[in-house]
Image (cartoon, grey):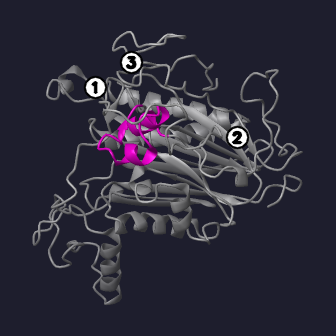
Amino acid sequence: MMSQMPQQAAPAKCPSCAEPLESGDLFCGACGYDLSAVPAAPPDHPTLTMGASGVGPSGVNWPPPEPESSSTPAAPHLPTDLPGTDSGGTPLPGSPLPGSPLPGSPVSPAPGVRFDRPPEPDEDYPLQAPDPRVAASAAENAESAGAAESAGAAKVCVACRAGRVDDDGYCENCGHAQPRERDHMEQESGPVAAVSDRGLRHHRNEDAFAVGRTALPDGTPAVLAVVCDGVSSATRPDEASMAASRAAGESLLTALPQGTHPQAALHEAIVAASHAVNALADEPTSAREHTPHQNAPACTIVGSVVTSGLLVVGWVGDSRAYWVPADRSAPPARLTEDDSWAAQMVAAGLMSEAQAYADERAHAITGWLGADAYELEPHTASFKPDRPGVVVVCTDGLWNYAETAEEMSEIVPADVALRPLHAARVLVGHALDGGGHDNVTVALLPFPAPPQGAGSA
């Protein structure tokens, strides 16, 4: 089953108070909000071609991702026609819609909106984690100097390189907590790679990822990546992101070899991830008695599948996917649209994109995975690029430091297709150099040159 929904005359929820609406409503029955200036959310597009006209099938005999309709197929769409467009091919938010009201008084988050992290001061905030690159360099220097310890010897602190680490994982000299396995994670699977780091301010890494490669029934290779960002204002966000990424990755690795269309497979993977996060809320009553006011575990999710001639993305929340062509003279594009307060304000014409994302409520999300989510609405979209490039799948810990598609394109190394793991490390380093205020996770999926006959750059 696909995520596509019929277009309604009114949005599914009131942008002001998130009260459910009926088709044809002109005003919100709960708060009286005028819905005439709020455009209805566009439906997901099953496939948006980005290749030259007359492009034939990629050679893979997938079943159609949704029932056939009598509507005329979309015209071929080149990557050069997509500067700053979202997964539906519409311009990214940047300015108020024609005829929309000027930015008015701030609209407060309401039910169906939650902040994905507690507020953090920008100044005088103690660094809780060392730069992993510095620690790694110190460790390498110590090893080259012959300071490697025997298996039974005590561990040395990665921060001060002098104190002994006690059994609880803290330095007896400077008191610094030592890196845990999840503080910095890297994985490479064929041409796809991912890196996750807890950053310089957080006490733990609440991001998680899954990458893998498989083959379609006809032997065509396929690679996948899933990135999840735990909602810090919820309980156990690190467990939520890990459960979601694992469930989604396993679902894709099972469905794709069976011949499931990649877009349908990604939709079902997001559903599987949602079930995995929901299950975390099923705690014994005795466990909840000690924390009765905590929210259920929650996270965002974004994923991508790349195979011969086809690029698929899917998401819930504000984690993103970008398209960066190998030919940097061609424009890049953002492939996802945030489920966030800021995106709602821009879509409603109440704020420009710059104003919305500068607001302290910008990162209040309106969609997430979790037992307390208002409803599950996976977004999916497919593209057929006519040239090679790379898909950047990341959490806001990275895109906060490279928000636009053009900015993201500038920091992706030119040799990403040859050294994807190195490129992922470079992108994480960019976020750390920018301040590392959040956990940082990025996965890179190179998109190969299209098959012969599928257009050219």
Between 26 and 237, the one nearer to me in the picture? 26
Q: Quadrant of the N terminus?
A: top right
> Element under label 1?
loop
From which residue to which does the magenta span run?
A: 338-366
**Which residue ends up furthest to the bottom in the rendered image?**
145
Mark found first going from the N terminus, 3 or 1: 3
Q: Position of residue 140 (x, y in %)?
A: 35, 81
Mark found first going from the N terminus, 1 or 2: 2
Q: Position of residue 231 (x, y in %)?
A: 33, 40
Q: Position of residue 423 (x, y in %)?
A: 53, 67
Distance of label 3 from label 1 (alpha carbons): 38 Å
Q: Quickly name the residue at label 2.
A: 257
Tell me, yes or no, whether the highlighted magenta stretch contains residue 294: no
> Element under label 2?
helix
Residue at image coords 18%, 26%: 293
Judge whether 7 appears above or below 52 on screen.
above
Residue at image coords 62%, 72%: 415
Between 411 and 201, the one nearer to me in the picture? 411
Q: Is residue 30 left or right of residue 389?
A: left
Single out the mark in the foreground, 3 or 1. 3
The circle drawn on residue 33 is 3
Residue type for callout 3? Tyr
Distance of label 2 from label 3 (alpha carbons): 48 Å
Tell me, yes or no, whether the highlighted magenta stretch contains residue 358: yes
Count the labels in the image.
3
Judge whether 326 appears above or below 105 on screen.
below
The circle drawn on residue 283 is 1
Distance of label 1 from label 2 (alpha carbons): 35 Å
